[in-house]
Amino acid sequence: MKTKVIFFGNEQLAQGIKPKTILFDAIQASDEFEICAVLLTNPNHRKPYAIEKAAKAANIPVYFSKNNDEIMEIIGQYEAPVAVLASFGKIIPERIINAFPCGIINIHPSMLPKYRGTTPIETAILNGDSETGVSVMRLAKAMDAGNTFAQEIVKIEDTDTKQSLYEKLATAGAKHLLEVLPAIVAKNATETAQNEADATFTTQLTKDLSELKPASKDAQTLLNEVRAYAGFPKSKLTLLDTPCTISSVHVADSPITELDQKCVDGKYLIIDRLIPENSKEMDAKSFLNGHKK
């Protein structure tokens, strides 16, 4: 008989991505574990979460928790020794963590204690890091401060977007989760305490970060912003009097079209693809053909 697992969260490990059910699918496909319930916070009335659809397709109950007492009631309906959490979006109090004999296991997309908080993927891209990582950790009272069971360094390629990096990290996290989960349930897993002196913290993304500012920033910084802000909060420029979302760019020493932006370091941010207001995504040439007067 497979060990029951309750899944907390929607797997959206970064803001503005198209979340995939990578962790959910890995647990369901394992020989040792099965998800018996999925707990989410607020329902998405405009479009159901991917994990919500996957759970319902597998006849797994989905709950939208209103408060902690309700969560405790839901947990009480199942005999799950452990829970897995990925992007629940709500602080979990100790009484809920302690309701599971083996605790709640969190998948965090950074090499903890670096980049605790809600935007580790975006922060790694914004900082121009060459690598980041994923941590399988025990959920604790303090944010992202629990002991780690497993970690893996993941290289950040120059071509990685927020979406592609999220998929790499979720895939690595699923692999390591399934490797350590049997020992966690058996209560003989090796845990490593984080060094609090090395902890760094990320901040929330806000819409006021959207505007690209070539007059005050270098080209590489703006390229990183386009990659990190994809989906949300997005990167914006007004081109040929048209508000646009910039979806793909690269850096060069000289411009290719009149859309390209000279930056404070003298290099150019080359606009490859963009989404004009009230229109579909297109390449720079198509935009110029349709908007140049």
Image (cartoon, rainbow, N blue to C red):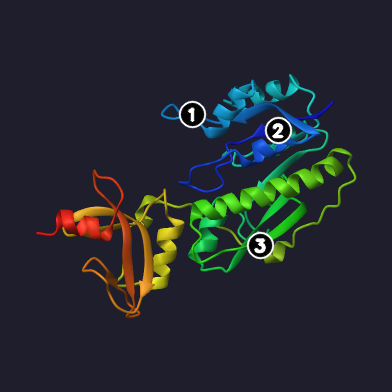
Q: Which percent across, then down, holds residue 160?
A: 51, 60
Mark 3 lies on a secondary structure that is loop
Name the residue at the left extreme.
293
Query: How far apart, in angstroms, are the residues tagged by discs 2 and 1?
Result: 20 Å
Mark 3 is surrounded, within 10 Å at the Cα level, by few (under 14), some (14 to 19) or many (20 or more) other residues, namely: some
> Marks 1 and 3: in contact by CB < 8 Å?
no
- Measuring 72% from the left and 48% from the top, which residue is drawn there? 175
Q: Nearer the viewer, residue 102 or 145?
A: 102
Residue 178 sits above or below residue 125 on the image: above
Q: Quadrant of residue 200?
A: bottom right
Query: How far apart, in angstroms, are the residues tagged by discs 3 and 1?
Result: 35 Å
Q: Quadrant of residue 268?
A: bottom left
Residue placed under numbered mark 1 in the picture: 48
Q: Nearer the viewer, residue 201 or 160?
A: 160
Mark 1 is surrounded, within 10 Å at the Cα level, by few (under 14), some (14 to 19) or many (20 or more) other residues, namely: few
Q: Quadrant of the N terminus?
A: top right
- Measuring 48% from the left and 43% from the top, which residue is drawn there? 18
Residue 80 sits above or below residue 186 on the image: above
Residue placed under numbered mark 2 in the picture: 28
Q: Which percent across, then down, holds residue 264?
A: 32, 77
